[in-house]
Image (cartoon, rainbow, N blue to C red):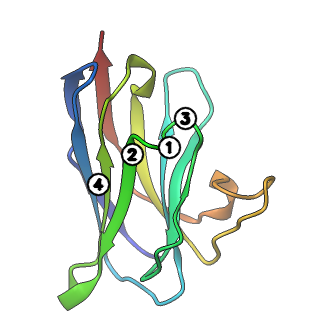
Amino acid sequence: QVQLVESGGGSVQAGGSLRLSCVASEYPARYCMGWFRQALGKEREGVAQVWTGGDNIEYADSVKGRFTLSQDNANGKNTLYLEMNNLKPEDTAMYYCAAGPVCHYTASERLRPANFGSWGQGTQVTVSS
């Protein structure tokens, strides 16, 4: 299984920005990498996903235009990023990096946590109003 370690979380005021990083133990070709989040008392939800080395990125509607997923797998860096701008209090959550064998694009399967088998330990993001 791919080992994942997130970092970059913190506390910011509404309107602020954060950049999350996720370092993977390996970066298989044609693997699906994603960011998810889970607020206290709520279910885990998908934020963004992409094929390793690809550029077709899927975003949750709630973050489109504010969050940007990128990746750097050159020279063994094996890192997934999530640039978060114009943060809102409702973005407060534990953010997780995940990996799975397939990126799904249908309405029912896209950004679905059950499709990802490897997870990091999470990094907390807190946005105050």
Q: Nearer the viewer, residue 75 or 55?
A: 55
Q: Secondary structure at mark 4?
A: strand
Q: Are marks 2 and 4 in contact (CB under 8 Å)?
A: no
Q: Answer with mark 3 or mark 2, whichever residue precedes in sequence.
A: 3
Identify the image quadrant of the C terminus.
top left
Q: Is residue 9 or residue 84 the one in the foreground? A: 84
Query: Contact, CB < 8 Å: mark 1 with mark 2?
Result: yes
Q: Position of residue 11 (x, y in %)?
A: 21, 25
- Mark 3: which amino acid? Ser
Say which mark, if any, is on residue 67. 2
Q: Disc 4 marks which residue?
A: 6
Q: Residues within 10 Å of mark 4 (few under 14, many from 20)?
A: many
Q: Looking at this view, is 46 or 117 the one in front?
A: 46
Pointer 2: residues within 10 angstroms few (<14), some, or many (20+)? many
Q: Residues within 10 Å of mark 1 (few under 14, many from 20)?
A: few
Q: Are the two marked residues, 3 and 2, in contact with CB atoms closer than 8 angstroms?
A: no
- Which type of secondary structure does the marked residue at label 3 adopt? loop
Quadrant of residue 79 in the image?
bottom left
> Where residue 70 sits: x, y (%)?
34, 65
15 shown above or below 44: above
Q: Nearer the viewer, residue 21 or 5?
A: 21
For the residues labelled 2 and 4, the Cα–Cα distance comes to: 16 Å
Depth check, mark 4 against mark 1: the one in front is 1
Residue at coordinates 37% horizontally, 53% vertically from top-left?
Answer: 68
* Amino acid found under the numbered disc labelled 1: Lys
**Label pair 3/1, CB-CB below 8 angstroms:** yes
Spatial CA span between label 3 and label 1? 6 Å
The mark total stands at 4
Q: Earlier in the sequence, mark 4 or mark 1?
A: 4
Q: Which residue is mark 3?
A: 62
Q: Secondary structure at mark 1?
A: loop
Q: Quadrant of residue 15?
A: top left
